[in-house]
């Protein structure tokens, strides 16, 4: 591998590996994504009865990330694409699940340090995935959320749906135009799927729901720094995807770098675009846990691994999925996609089992089954072996494969029903605006001071006036598409 140190010979690697002791072997997997879950399943299916397996994740569920954008665009509910990790691994007494955040890895001691104590291991599989990278501008995240978690998806859904609601009651034309302008930064599969879903949502789903605005007049702008969108696809498929987006009303800018993201605008090249909602799909960075290992990392913070997916000098530690930087025999870097994570998770488990059986480890080889991206209703692009598909046929292939890979029969059925309903009725069933504040009403100590001092009858009259004044003041100061706290309290009281 061109990015790693000089690899050890086969005999040296064999000498370094932990020798089976005959007693229980404790394997710890960090991360419940595609790589971690598939590694755990393979170990439980083929491992010895004495095997002990611990899965550690800071969340209690496995998330089907390829469909996360549909939660963000109100097409699916979070429960449709997520399953509790304990339910996935249920029924095997060899496994335990620990909900905790790993703070660091102590390689020499073979120990994890978590926010709820330490965990010792014989073998460690790191599958922590990746997070968003803002290219040195972490302050942009507040104004342009990415899409990696359910929390981020529901926040994007809240911002998008709130923008339409605010535009419906906004009397000023310029402010209304800003609220109905959406910018997606990044022309990879996630950015294309978000932009296409925004175009479809505004033109088909919401068209009959509003009286004062025309959602079809929404402006959706997709900004890509390279010379074309979907750069990992064939150039002809990229052109077809661009045309499909344009039919949905999406404007595509290529060769354009974003240099500033503020509360109410984006600076892209020489242009300033005033927008109510900005979404980020431009860059990723591996889990920060990788930096605690003290081993070589690549530019994106991924661990440079050996041919068997192990950490150089530590064969008992294997890194898989988006956290690993793995180059194939021809020098090409495997992409950070779900099929790679699934195959690496299974392969890492097999190599651990080879060690336990005293057998030679096998080098990992990625079998590319193809790449796909959906653009909107009955439109997608797919590159499968020698075949290049687009339009309805590609969308059918994309839908079938994603249904198959969903974990759990219930999830498959629910997603299928939702898609059929959306296709026939042009409706989306998860158009809920949810807030992070769980309290039903303000505490007495938060009421306006003058209202508390008035007698009961006068205070009852003063409260709506004070709430209205606060709402007007808040709108004048803030351009966020979020209703004021007083307005929320009034709405809750009236409900």
Image: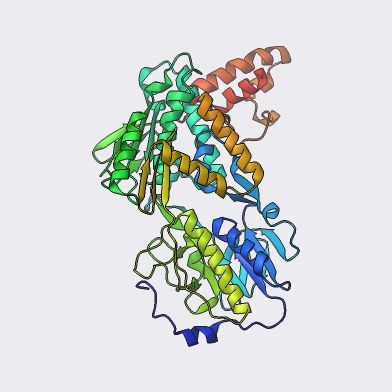
The residue at the point 33 percent across, 42 percent down is: 260
Specify the quadrant of the image occupied by residue 327.
bottom left
Work out whether 255 lies above or below 57: above
Q: Is residue 164 left or right of residue 429?
A: left
Q: Nearer the viewer, residue 19 or 435?
A: 19
Residue visible at 54% across and 80% down in the picture: 360
Left or right placement of residue 481 versus residue 431 in this view = left
| Residue 186 shows in this picture | no
Tell me if residue 214 can be seen: yes
- Horizontal and vertical percent for residue 387? 36, 49
Residue in the foreground of this view, choosing between 32 and 357: 357
Residue lying furthest left: 270
Left or right, 417 with respect to 397, comes to right
- Residue at coordinates 69% horizontally, 59% vertically from top-left? 97
x and y percentages locating residue 332 in the rendered image:
35, 64
How many tags in the picture? 0
């Amino acid at each position: 591998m061109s990015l790693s140190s000089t690899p050890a010979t086969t005999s040296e690697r064999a000498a370094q590996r932990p020798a089976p002791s005959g007693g229980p072997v404790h394997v710890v997997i960090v991360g419940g994504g595609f790589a971690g879950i598939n590694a755990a399943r393979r170990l439980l299916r083929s491992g010895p009865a004495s095997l002990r397996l611990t899965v550690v994740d800071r969340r209690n569920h496995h998330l089907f990330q390829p469909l996360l954008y549909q939660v963000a665009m109100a097409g699916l509910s979070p429960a449709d694409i997520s399953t509790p990790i304990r339910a996935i691994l249920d029924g095997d007494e060899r496994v335990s699940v620990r909900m905790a955040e790993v703070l660091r890895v102590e390689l020499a001691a073979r120990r994890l340090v978590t926010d709820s104590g330490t965990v010792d291991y014989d073998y460690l599989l790191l599958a922590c995935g990746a997070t968003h990278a803002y290219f040195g501008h972490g302050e942009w995240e507040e104004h342009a959320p990415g899409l990696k978690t359910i929390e981020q998806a529901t926040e994007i859904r809240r911002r998008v749906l709130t923008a339409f609601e605010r535009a419906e009651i906004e009397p000023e034309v310029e402010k209304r135009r800003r609220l109905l302008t959406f910018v997606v930064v990044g022309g990879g599969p996630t950015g294309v799927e978000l932009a296409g879903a925004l175009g479809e949502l505004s033109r088909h789903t919401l068209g009959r729901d509003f009286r004062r605005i025309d959602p079809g007049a929404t402006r959706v702008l997709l900004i890509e720094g390279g010379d074309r969108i979907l750069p990992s696809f064939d150039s002809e498929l990229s052109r077809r995807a661009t045309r499909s987006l344009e039919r949905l009303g999406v404007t595509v800018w290529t060769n354009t770098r974003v240099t500033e993201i503020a509360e109410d605008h984006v600076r892209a090249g020489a242009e300033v675009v005033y927008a109510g909602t900005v979404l980020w799909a431009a860059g990723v960075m591996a889990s920060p846990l990788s930096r605690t290992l003290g081993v070589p990392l690549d530019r994106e913070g991924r661990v440079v691994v050996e041919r068997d997916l192990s950490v150089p000098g530590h064969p008992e530690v294997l890194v898989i999925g988006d956290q690993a930087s793995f180059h194939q025999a021809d020098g090409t870097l495997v992409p950070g996609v779900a099929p790679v994570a699934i195959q690496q998770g299974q392969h890492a488990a097999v190599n651990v089992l080879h060690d336990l059986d005293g057998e030679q480890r096998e080098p990992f080889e990625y079998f590319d089954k193809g790449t796909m991206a959906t653009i909107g209703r009955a439109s997608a692009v797919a590159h499968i072996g020698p075949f290049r598909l687009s339009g309805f046929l590609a969308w059918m292939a994309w839908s079938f494969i994603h249904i198959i890979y969903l974990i759990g029969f219930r999830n498959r059925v629910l997603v299928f029903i939702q898609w059929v309903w959306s296709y026939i009725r042009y409706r989306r069933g998860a158009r809920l605006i949810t807030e992070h504040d769980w309290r039903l009403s303000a505490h007495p100590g938060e009421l306006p001071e003058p209202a508390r001092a008035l007698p009961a009858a006068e205070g009852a009259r003063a409260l709506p006036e004070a709430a209205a004044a606060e709402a007007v003041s808040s709108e004048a100061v803030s351009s966020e598409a979020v209703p004021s706290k007083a307005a929320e309290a009034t709405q809750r009281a009236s409900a």
